[in-house]
Image: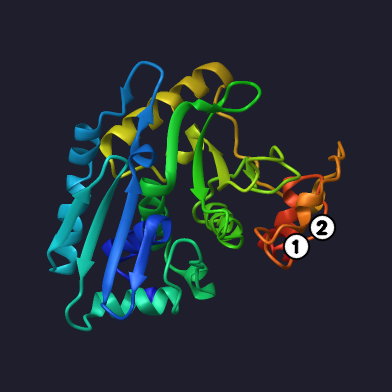
């Protein structure tokens, strides 16, 4: 099935994986997107007005309608917009969605099937673009210690396996987008009162242009931040994460919060000094090579 995927279907899988949920009993797909997920804040321009954000999604809604042949319902609240598609019959698209996500029902628990990593390059790119349209944050406040701008891909705290799968997909030899770091929603890496937040996969803006966004204004801000990085730092050859070559440089303070039930049971109770130790413990592909 994976090798027979269409670009549009791969894109739909990405949107769904980023912010979607599946109701198997009603054959319904819902994608709820907080407005903050599609805001784009650049150096000279900002896109954060609700009406413009809603209009910015029209192309995606139209694309989904044309591709699925279904009526796509779009509703908005004060903080989010919800895109709904009801599959009244067991169509090829619905069958493909349910097979891909294998009974899982939400971006809170979605995982990628192993054979997807062997899919053609265009399929993986379209999936990542769909995922990033709704789960990717591009704003000038997302920078490292040297003020080099980054894109953040945010994944719910409840989903501990998807971050390393997205990282693996980005650093696939055909995609070649290096991940700078993953900020895990874990008490060893965040404050004691707000650690159970989303996981953030962080990529420098100039490298993320390989993926890009379908939403025009997000792509505009991405290009602005990427160009600013190149002007300030030059274009550096990508350096890919290699956990096996890393060393601990500073130890974190112990905290009892490592025993929280919000942490995946396979790493609950463990103390970590670096992000890549969590990656390794959760099965990072680059550690198995």
CA gap between label 2 and label 1 equals 6 Å
Measuring from the top left, give residue 132's x and y in whole percent.
Answer: 41, 48
Residue 210 visible to the viewer: no
**Which residue is tagged 2?**
270
Q: Residue furthest bottom?
A: 90
Measuring from the top left, give residue 5's x and y in whole percent.
Answer: 33, 71
Measuring from the top left, give residue 145's x and y in whole percent.
Answer: 66, 24
Depth check: give the residue in front, 8 or 162: 162
x 36%, y 77%: residue:
98
Depth check: give the residue in front, 79 or 6: 79
At mark 2, the secondary structure is loop
Q: Quadrant of the C terminus?
A: bottom right
Residue 26 visible to the viewer: yes
Depth check: give the residue in front, 105 or 205: 105
Image position of 90 (left or right of 222) = left
x 44%, y 23%: residue:
227
Q: Label 2 crowding class (10 Å Cα cut-off): few <14, some 14-19, many 20+? A: some
At mark 1, the secondary structure is loop
Q: Label 1 crowding class (10 Å Cα cut-off): few <14, some 14-19, many 20+? A: some
Q: Are marks 2 and 1 in contact (CB under 8 Å)?
A: yes
x 15%, y 54%: residue:
62
Asked if 14 appears above or below 77 in the picture, the reply is: below
Label placed on residue 19: none
x 33%, y 54%: residue:
32
Q: Quadrant of the N terminus?
A: bottom left
Depth check: give the residue in front, 69 or 259: 259
Asked if 73 appears above or below 57 in the picture, the reply is: below
**Which residue is tagged 1?**
267
């Amino acid at each position: 099935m994976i090798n027979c995927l269409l670009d549009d279907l791969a894109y739909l899988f990405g949107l769904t994986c980023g912010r979607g949920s599946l109701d198997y009993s009603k054959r319904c797909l819902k994608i709820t997107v907080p407005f903050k997920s599609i805001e784009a804040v650049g150096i000279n321009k900002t896109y954060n007005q609700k009406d413009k954000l809603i209009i910015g999604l029209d192309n995606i809604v139209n694309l989904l309608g044309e591709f699925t042949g279904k009526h796509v319902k779009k509703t908005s609240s004060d903080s989010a917009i919800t895109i709904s598609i009801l599959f009244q019959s067991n169509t090829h698209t619905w069958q493909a969605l349910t097979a891909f996500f294998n009974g899982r029902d939400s971006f809170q628990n979605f995982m990628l099937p192993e054979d997807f990593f062997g899919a053609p390059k265009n399929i993986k790119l379209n999936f990542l673009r769909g995922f990033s349209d709704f789960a990717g944050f591009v704003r000038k406040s997302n920078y490292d210690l040297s003020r080099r701008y980054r894109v953040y891909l945010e994944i719910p705290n409840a989903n501990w396996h998807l971050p390393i799968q997205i990282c693996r997909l980005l650093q696939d030899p055909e995609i070649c987008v290096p991940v700078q770091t993953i900020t895990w929603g874990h008490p060893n890496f965040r404050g004691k009162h707000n650690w159970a937040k989303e996981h953030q996969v962080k990529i420098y803006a100039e490298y993320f242009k390989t993926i890009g966004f379908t939403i025009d204004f997000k792509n505009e801000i991405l290009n602005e931040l990427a160009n600013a990085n190149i002007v300030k730092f030059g274009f550096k050859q990508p350096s890919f994460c290699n956990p096996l070559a890393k060393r601990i440089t500073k130890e974190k303070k112990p905290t009892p919060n490592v025993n929280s039930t919000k942490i995946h049971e396979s790493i609950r109770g463990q103390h970590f000094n670096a992000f890549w130790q969590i990656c390794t413990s959760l099965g990072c592909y680059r550690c198995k090579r």
